[in-house]
Every structure is written in structure tokens, then in C-alpha cells.
Image (spheres, coloured by chain):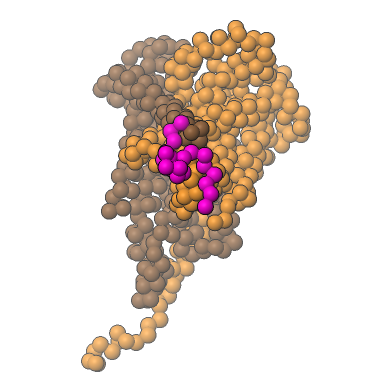
Amino acid sequence: MSFTSSRRTTDGLPDLSYQPRAARNVGSRVLTVVAALFSGIAVLPLVLVLGYVLIKGGSTLGLNLLTELPPPPGLEGGGIANAIVGTMVVTLVAALIAIPVGVGGGIFLAEYSRSGWFAQFIRFGTNVLSGVPSIIAGVFIYGTIVTSRVLFGNAYSALAGGMALAILMLPTVIKTTDEGLKLVPDDLRRAVLGIGASRFVMIAQITLPTAFTPIATGVVLSIARAAGETAPLIFTALFSPYWSDLVSGDGLLAPIASLSVLIYNFAIMPYEFHNQLAWSASFVLVAMILFLNLLSRWLGRFASR
Amino acid sequence: MAPDQDHLYRLRNRPFAEKLVDLGFKNITIALASVVAVVLFAILIIVFQGSLEAMGRYGLEFLVTSNWNPVDDEYGAGAAIYGTLLTSLLSLIIAVPLGVGTAIFITENIIPKSIRNLLGLMVELLAAIPSVVLGLWAIFVMEPFIRPALEFLHTAFHWLPMFSTPPMGPGTIPAVLILAVMILPIITAISRDSLNQVPGKLRQAAYGVGTTRWGAIINVILPAAVSGIVGGVMLALGRAMGETMAVTMIIGNSNNFSFSLLAPGNTIAAMLANQFGEADGSQVSSLMYAAFVLIVLTLGVNVMARWLVKRLSLKY
């Protein structure tokens, strides 16, 4: 038997021990350090952004911030209360549109037609729609809803903003419903159909409740994403420095404030107080979104038990 | 068998109402599923129709000229299209090594699993931060911080066209950096998933024939996962092209074409965010034309991503 290795122990046998100075081992260690460095750089922005949002935004957090209206440009004092309410309203409108449509579409894909040509086409369309830039959703709603004033003669409105966000949520909701329902074992379906239930009963009482957790996780994540979106809102929901009239419902048909648009508008203003309000709004927005993310994570862990 | 239980064993026809509910529900789900297709086609049609006027007036010249003058009604999106391609490609060059490196670091058994999971969680949370908050951070924290470095680049290399103008705050380089931050989580998440899917057998075989850790990663694991990684990179490219808010806030929104990376630039998405609200007349049509170009670019990248994934995927 011949060994190609030149290293020998004192007995003349090939040395199989680890050679820390061999070029390949040194190279491997160097690359490990490089990879560690890269992951350090990758998480650095998160730490820095969260740190600055926490320090700059959290420092001014007070009751007036959460209860008062933003001041006119140049003046000081006031809060971001209407924007907090507005973000919730617009996101709620989006969720009310996207969840029924998305869950319904997902049910069709997973329960009625797994591999039919129409289902394949819808799956492809869902993928394509999820790649459409968010600003295009805004342009689309502007072109259809805002300029045509189809909503009772109103141009910019909270409803239009919600529709734009719904377009962005839709692919995620469909995909998670489709994937969630596919995880339900087929044995369950056969058992339910076998004792004589109709397909509707099977879906409504067995498969949907079984797949509730993965669907809820995806839906919460998509809501979190929609809450932070700005681009689709800047020319659909616009902005408003006032309270929205939500009691009579007219507020839904008028421009509405939102945290993300407030950050955008106030960040590029030359007034220091407004810049500060943008940081405070970032703090509230990031807190809301991180809460939703943790909620979805908790839902997921709840399921794996 | 007692006679009063007889009805339990008789075959029962479904009542008409139940059949109606069943059929109705199926048709409702079909209708809801087709909403996706309707919205997608409506987006294409509305944007195409809106841009017809500008297409007729400027034709393909729109894509290469870069004068944007609402006063004289002269429009060309050359600078914005160049900016879109430039910023997204440069941000990929930064984000791909970082993202893939991070993905390798958190899938390989280098450090304890709890730390790896924490790193993965942090990268995922980075994806959750709204782009407008990243933009705010870029304006007030990142850009002032890197300004001295950019000034050094200008003084040392001003004979290069890339660095020929003095940095003035907003510009292409800060936009590229913030874009890299935004697409990093996508690349990391998808690379991590595809690295995790590489069968353990391949890794064991590689170690079995005596390679080092990185010998196995570079020669065996990465080639096996390349289809997923390339797909993730392409998706990230599509996202970078369409990314709006952070870029709008930091790129400077100048329609003057410049080779300098230190000068303010523009992207299609930034231009739309900036001007759509107050545009009228043929400016709207020109913006729609630019939006159509953006749709074609992102859809092209996305479809190509899927095709590449299919082409490159290895069969074990």
C-alpha cells in the first residue's frame, strides 16, 4: 500500500493528525473568519437602525404625542395621534379586502384544483403579482380609483389607500393559505368525505380549522408588511393634518394620515421639530410592526406544540 | 335491528339546498382566485393605456434621453432608467457576498445553534423594518457618517468620472448602500433555505474523502444549492429595482444625467413617488410610460429568476 502524503510520523507511518499550518487548513480558517465578519456586517444595520429609532424616537415619547395632532410646518408642539389611527384604519381596510379574497383564492388552489391549468395560471399570477413593485400598486389605484373619482366623487381617500395595500397583501395571503391547506393530511379529507360530508362542510369545518395557524401566521406577517408600506399611499390616501371623521364614515372617503407617509413628509421638511416627530413616528411604527412579527412567531410556535 | 333505526341505513340523497351551497362555494372560490389574474391584467392595461400618449409622442427615444422639463413639456426617462439599473446592480454587488456569506455562516456548524438562530432572527427582523424608516435613518445618520469617506474619494480620485463631483449629501452611493441593506435579508433568507435543503449525504461524502470545511462548502454544497441562491439573487434584483421610499429620500431626485456616483441621481420608482401626486397632462402620461418600463423590467427579472432556477436545479 502506498501513501502519497509526504508527512510521516517517527515510525515511518503516514501522519493523519490535523495540520494546523497546512495551507488548506489556514485557508479554511480565514474563510470562516470572513463569513463571521460578513454576518456581523449583515446584522449591523438592524442594530444601528433599531438603536437610533429607540433613542431618537423613544426619548420624546409622551402622552401628548399619542393624543395630539401634528403642528403646522414651522410651529412646535403636538403629536402624531391622527397618523396612528390612520395607519390602523388603512391597514384594516386592506386586511378586510385581502383576507377574504386571498383565503378564498387559496382554498380554490389547495382544495379544488391542485394542478389544473387554471390553478397553475393563478399560481404563476400570484408569483408575478408578488414581484410587482409597491409603487406600481399606487400608480394602478391612482389610475383607476383616484382619477375616475369612482368612490362617490371622492378622489384621494382612505379606501383607495387600503385597496392599494390590499394588492400588496393579496399574494402573501393566497400563498400562505395554499401552503397551509396543503399541509393538512389527505387522510382527514378522505375520512370526512367518506362519512358523507359535502366538500363545503369538509373545508369549512375540518381543513380550514386545521390549517388555521399557518394561515394566521402568514396573514399577520402580511398585515405587518402592509402597515409599513409608504409608496402605495402617497398618492392614494395622501395625508391629512386633521382627525378623520370615522364616526360617520366620511373619513374613509377623505384623505387620511398614516405613520409611514408622515415619516416621509416630515423627514424631508427643513424644521427640526418635524424631523423629531418623524423619529417618534418611526418608533411607534417599528414597535407596531415588531409586535406583529413576534405575534406571528408566537402563533407559529403555538402550532408546533 | 330495531325497526325505528331503519332510516339510519337508508341511502339519502343530498337536499337541493346543500348541493347549491356546495356548488356556490366552489364558484365563489374560483371567482376570488381569478381576482389575482384580473388585478394583474388590469395593472398592465391601465399603465399601458396611460402611457400610450407619451409612447406615441416620444417613442423609444424616451428611454435614452434624460431631459425632464414640465415647463416645456419635454420628457425623457434615460437618467431614471440608468439610475434604476445602476443602483440595483451595485447594491447586488455589495449584498450578494454579504448575504451568501451570512447564510453559509448560519447554516454550517461553525458556532453554537442558539447564536446562529439569533443571527437568523435578526436578519429576518431587518426585513420587517419599513423602508421609510430606513430612509429616515439614511438621511440623518448614515449619510452624515459616510460623508467624510465620500469627500476623501472625491479629493483622491476626482480624475475618475465616477467620483468627479463633490458629494453634496443625497447621492447615488448612499442610495446604493441603503438598497443593499434592504435586499440583504432576501438574499440571506433564500440562500439559507436552499443551503438547508442540500442533502446531508453530500456533505458527509465530501468530509469522508478528506476535504476541509470550506473545500466542502465551495466544491460541493454551494454548487448543489446554486439554483436557489441564484433565484434569491434575482428576486432581490427585482425588489431593488422597484424599491421606492428609502431611495427617494436619499438619492437626491435629479434628472440630470451624471456618471458620478457622488452626484444626486434618480430611479424610476423615486421619480414616480416624487412627481405623481402633483403631475397633470402629459406629465402623467410620461410617468405612466416610466412606470410601464419599470413593470417590464421587474417582471422580466422575476420570470427570468424562475427560468434560471429550473435550468440550474441539480437532480440528486
> In this picture, which residue range is highlighted in magenta?
A1-21
Q: Is residue B159 left or right of residue A48?
A: right
Q: Height in image: B155 above or below A164?
A: above
Which residue is depicted at the point 41% across and 28% down? Answer: A40
At 37% from the left and 26% from the top, the residue drawn is A47
Magenta segment includes B176: no
Task: Please indicate, yes or no, whether residue A212 appears anywhere in the rendered image.
Answer: yes
Q: Is A207 in front, or is A70?
A: A207
Q: x, y (%) of residue B266?
A: 61, 23
In this rendering, position of residue B2 left or right of residue A292: left
Quick one: which chain is orange?
B
Residue at 29% from the left image edge and 25% from the top image edge? A66
Left or right of B295? Residue B52 is right
Based on the displayed image, in which of its 4 quarters is residue B259 positioned?
A: top right
Q: Who is closer to the viewer here, B291 or A121?
A: A121
For chain A, the rendered hue is brown
User: Where is residue B285, by image quadrant?
Assistant: top right
Quadrant (top left/top right/bottom left/bottom right) for the N terminus of chain B:
bottom left
Image quadrant in which you'd find residue B255: top right
Which x, y percent locates residue A221? 40, 42
* Residue pictured at 39% horizontal, 64% vertical: A185
